[in-house]
Amino acid sequence: MTPNLPENRILDHAEMLPRGELQALQLKRLQKAVAHAQNIPYYQDAFAKAGILADSIQSLDDLRRLPFTTKDDLREQYPLGMLAVDRSEVLRFHGSSGTTGKPTMVAYTRNDLNMWANLCARFLTAGGLRPEHTVQIAFGYGLFTGGFGLHYGVERVGASVIPAAAGNTPKQVMLLMDMQADALVCTPSYALTISEFIISNDIPRDALNLKYAFFGGEPWTQDMADRIESELGIASFNNYGLSEVIGPGISGECIAKNGMHISEDYFIVECINPQTLEPVAPGEQGELVFTTLCREAMPIIRYRTRDIASLNPEPCSCGRTTMRMSRVTGRSDDMLIIKGVNVYPSQIEQALLRVEGTAPHYQIIVDRPDRTDIATVQVEMTEELFSAGMKEMQELKEKISRAVQGITGLRMNIELVSPNTLERFTGKASRVKDLRREKGLI
């Protein structure tokens, strides 16, 4: 059970629009967004190839006639080929991490930044943040949108910010205690690192004043949420965003904690089968696709996020009428295919967190030494089990193996490693090492 749930509060009347009124607003804004996107040569060509003019968008169903935009399309336009306004109108640039090459750069006008702050303030309010609170932000500040996005969202709510940035866990904990922050913002994997430090240093929970946490930046399971809430004694709320669309603020959880509300007055969301590109039914897992409706500097049409989730169009008990999205369970391009079976890292995490005696730190290594895939899951033991005998450790390996097989359907090698030996992450966690890809086998 989630502790310390706040009272329900809705920041913006637009979050409660009747469906028909919301769709009328979306159509009006979509027509304007498509016309604005034609300021970008890339979209001029893409729309011409599809035989589409802005004034041919007469219904929301016409959205499906528009071409998709992909990460590769954005990379080809690096750095500013997707800019739709004069550069003098840009106030700030952000970008993706660029771990596989140059980052995709994203620009913001003054109106874009105001919209972004309001969107973040929406989900922060939905999760209990109030003007009298103090928030410690342990996200990186820089090209990454997490730090700045949440920073200005917190200020828009009227709460105060401790911009601690990522890393230096002892200092993070010191600030949490000394400043008596009410809320924490970071990735869920870094929250586990903070919790681990607090527990290993015998710091009593009441030395902190944490009530809430707002986590994002990477997929995480409900089991991980339960563990963080139990260890820190807080209520945690999930939020979603990606730099190519705007950053954090696309969606976030309310106190009902039954999916993340998408700000549909600013984004149209689709959920498609990544193979057939056809829409999937509500509740069915698929790839999320977003179209921005009000972005000035860089509008984006039908952006394939590669993130796998499901949509729920039913109104929420909190009073919001906006579509809700589930947790992201993986990425269509990060999905592992092992022995022909689709496996997401989140499934491994879900299995591990249900087995006592393991720490929530793991790595998946996939190799193909001959013609057969072999998957190994390295799992950290807790200090207590590390001190136990061989028999207990063998039993633990069997438990983990059964749990993993129960969820994925695959028998994997389980390798127990000493406490504090696997890499810790201050940003997005990297859980998979696919040696098949490194060897050019896939």
Image (cartoon, rainbow, N blue to C red):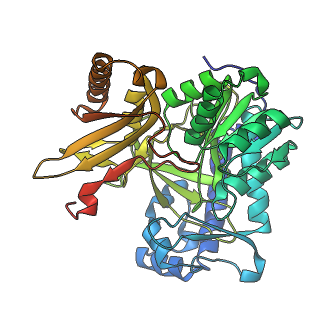
* Quadrant of the frame with the N terminus: top right
Residue 221 located left or right of residue 244: left
Give the total of numbered labels.
0
Residue in the foreground of this view, choosing between 274 and 394: 394
Q: Is residue 356 above or below residue 349?
A: above
Relative side of 441 to 272, left or right? left
Q: Give the residue displayed 57% in from the left and 33% down from the top.
A: 259
48 or 3, which lies in front?
Answer: 3
- Residue at point 35%, 53% (across, down): 274
Q: Position of residue 118 (x, y in %)?
A: 77, 50
Q: Position of residue 188 (x, y in %)?
A: 58, 39
In the current view of this chain or complex, which residue is farthest to the left? 371
Q: Quick check: can you spot residue 123?
A: no
Residue 33 image point, x, y percent: 63, 66
- In which quadrant of the rendered image does the C terminus lie? bottom left
Q: Is residue 350 above or below residue 114?
A: above
Q: Residue at x 76, y 31 (%)?
A: 128
**Residue 283: in sight, yes or no?**
yes
Q: Position of residue 305 (x, y in %)?
A: 47, 56
Which quadrant of the view contains residue 11? Answer: top right
In the picture shown, does residue 437 fall above or below 176? Answer: below
- Residue 300: quadrant of the picture: bottom right
Choose between 411 and 42: the one closer to the eye.
Answer: 411
